[in-house]
Image (cartoon, rainbow, N blue to C red):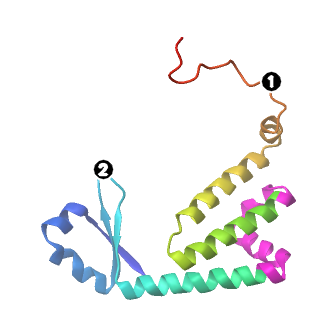
Amino acid sequence: MATRSFPYSTFLRGPSEVLPTLDDADVILERRDDENLILMRAERFEAGAASLRIAGRALATVARRNASLAEEVLAEELPWLTWLPETERHQCVRELLDHLIAGADTGEFLPFARSLISWRSTAVVWSDPRLARELQGPFSGDGPDAARPGAES
């Protein structure tokens, strides 16, 4: 599906200039001081959500029956999975699938997106042996004691 972008102010001044675009494209309303907004027809939104729900459940079924196959499928889309140690790779796949299925059921995909970013960052750390070793410890200490908030000095 194509997308077209309009300044948010254009939509506020005259929605009739923007709304006809929805016949052929989704609309991104660009805002200067906040996140952009997306307008789309409900039918297209529902089709996307239903498709994602089916794909998420299908992948979850594959994962339950053949974990290594699910991992292989995800690794094709997420090649950075190979940087994770095997135990973490299994945990990552499980967590991503859980978030994907929950998101497909609720329409709330931010937990999935956050988990994806977090796991990708973790994989990048594991890709650098020196950094991975440093972050596993041992650490030199807990640092200096800090006064409790509100405590008198």
Q: Nearer the viewer, residue 8 or 144?
A: 144
Q: Nearer the viewer, residue 1 or 99?
A: 99
Task: Look at discs 1 and 2 and give the one toward the viewer.
Answer: 1
* Residue at 61% over, 56% down: 117
Q: Main secondary structure of the magenta part?
A: helix
Q: Residue furthest left?
A: 13
Residue type pointed to by label 1: Ser
The quarter of the picture where residue 138 lies is: top right
Task: Find disc 1 in the rendering and name its residue.
Answer: 140
Q: Is residue 46 above or below residue 135?
A: below
- Residue 70, image x, y percentages: 78, 76
Figure disc tally:
2
Give the SS element for disc 1: loop
Q: Please state the extent of the stretch shown in magenta in the rendering.
A: 63-87
Give the SS element for disc 2: loop
Q: Is residue 62 magenta?
A: no
Q: Quadrant of the N terminus?
A: bottom left
Task: Find disc 2 in the rendering and name its residue.
Answer: 33
Crowding at dot 2, Cα within 10 Å, few <14 / some 14-19 / many 20+, comes out as few
The quarter of the picture where residue 86 lies is: bottom right
Q: Is residue 153 above or below residue 13?
A: above
* Residue at 62% over, 20% down: 146
| Residue 56: image tag | none
* Residue at 63% over, 76% down: 101
Q: Is residue 86 above or below residue 138?
A: below
Horizontal side of residue 27 vs 12, given as left or right: right
Residue type pointed to by label 2: Asp
